[in-house]
Amino acid sequence: MQLKRPAHALRNRLIAASCTLLGATTARAGDLTSDASPAADAAPASDAAQTVADTALAYYAENNGRVRAIEPIVNLRQDLGDERALSVKLTFDSLSGATPNGAVPSARAQTFASPSGHSLTAAPQTYTTASGQSSVVSSPIYTIAPGQLPMDPNYHDQRLAASGSYQMPWSSLTRTTYGGDLSYEHDFISVSGNGALAHDFNQKNTTLSLGGNYEFDFVRPIGGAPVAGSDYTLFEKQGSHTKHDANIVLGVTQVMTRRWLSELSLSYDRLNGYLNDPYKILSIVDGGGNVTGYLYERRPDHRARSSVYLENRLALDRAMAGLTLRYMSDDWGIHSETAQLKLRWSNAERDRYLEPQLRWYRQTAASFYTPWLSSAGSSYITAASSDERLGAFHAVTWGLKYAARFPDDQGGDGSELSIRAELYRQTPDHRLPGPGALSGLNLYPGLQALLVQVEWRFGY
């Protein structure tokens, strides 16, 4: 977030975690295929060649003047016949508002610099680059009132992303999908490629799928990447960094009965390179609860994650229910559990439906997570971060979607217009008591957010 921290991480938490925008397929009433699984992404195309367009506009807002996001998306899928299909997706994000910088609230006013700053004073300063060139700059600074959560009020970011995939059959029972993604931000560029193979067994009642993805990220923080674990007031900055992420997913989908479908998938990914948030700092606190300084955060340069995902869908006349469970663990010490329940009721004509959902999430803290550092042991840190996303917390999401379908003149599926609203509430579970002057402050305010999405799906 800007402060500015990389917006891709923010979107993972804010939008993707709250609701999936424009999946590769859109579930219909009575359908039992999953729109959030490798098997579903590799599902065969319809025999009737057509183009399907998904368009959506999402608005996201956090409480207390924090981050706001507007995200339009266009997804086009062209059926080429013979079980071949081409998909293209375009996304634009615009984010603004205020975002926590990682420091702890204090009984005294605190002054910070935005990422492009090189000093904690607004007076012009002479800045010398690594190449020896000098320039005069004025640091954009902001002051946080006593007792308030330190947040940079100047957060803003924009992202343009494009992705595409091509699906083709190898045989009557085997399908492959190839794809790629490109994402551009002012301080972040990401390029990835992926592929998947799906094979049907048991009279097409069982599907086994294998997929992989490789992502390369070029991180170029505003003002330069800070030296991890260094004194914040020295503003020691370096150049750009890179990050790599390799992922593999193995899944099996089984038609249990004509009304019940089950899916199980296992995934593993490994990240290497620059995994710090260049805009996050930690407070140094003495025994009396006084903030005596700040350090830039320091995270390990590698991370391995594994997860297991289970989904069951059941269709009963005009109703459908879906239950998903997911467990994740990594070598940072984070373990998380997710459970989500979706219900859907259609009217007698099946041209309207209502879909409530409930999502519950809980995670433990990373082994190096700490809300602040003690002044007695902050001279050198091997790894430390106060990022709330790495702390222990639980979250609940309530959602409701209403959709209306409009058949075309030939009696086909026509178009679908829907609106979805979701309320997200995150509650910290790691509540270390604050010493001295910190004891009476709200150190763990939590988070609430509202997401509204309008989607229009049509074929031509």
Image (cartoon, rainbow, N blue to C red):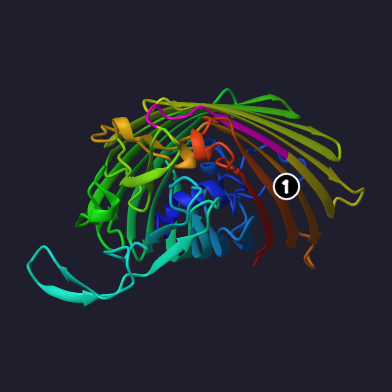
* Picture quarter with the N terminus: bottom left
Residue range highlighted in magenta: 358-368
Q: Residue furthest right?
A: 348
Left or right for 204, reference 38: right
Q: Is residue 185 above or below residue 305?
A: below
Residue 109 placement (x, y as % from top left): 47, 56
Q: Residue at x 39, y 59 (%)?
A: 112
Whether residue 121 appears in magenta in the rendering, the answer is no
Q: Is residue 206 visible?
A: no
The residue type indicated by label 1 comes to Arg
208 left or right of 311? left
Looking at the image, residue 452 sits to the left or right of residue 244; the answer is right
Residue under the image location 79 percent in, 54 percent down: 402
Q: Position of residue 357 (x, y in %)?
A: 74, 41
Q: Residue at x 73, y 47 (%)?
A: 28
Query: What residue did someone put label 1 on?
Result: 28
- Eyeballing the image, is 364 above or below 47? above
Q: Residue furthest left?
A: 132
Quadrant of the image occupied by residue 253: top right
Q: Nearer the viewer, residue 24 or 90?
A: 90
Q: Position of residue 14 (x, y in %)?
A: 56, 50
Rendered view: 27 above or below 457: above
Rendered location of residue 417, percent (x, y): 74, 62
Task: Kindly tell me whether residue 11 is visible in this rendering.
Answer: yes
Q: Dot 1 surroundings within 10 Å: few (below 14), some, or many (20 or more)?
A: few
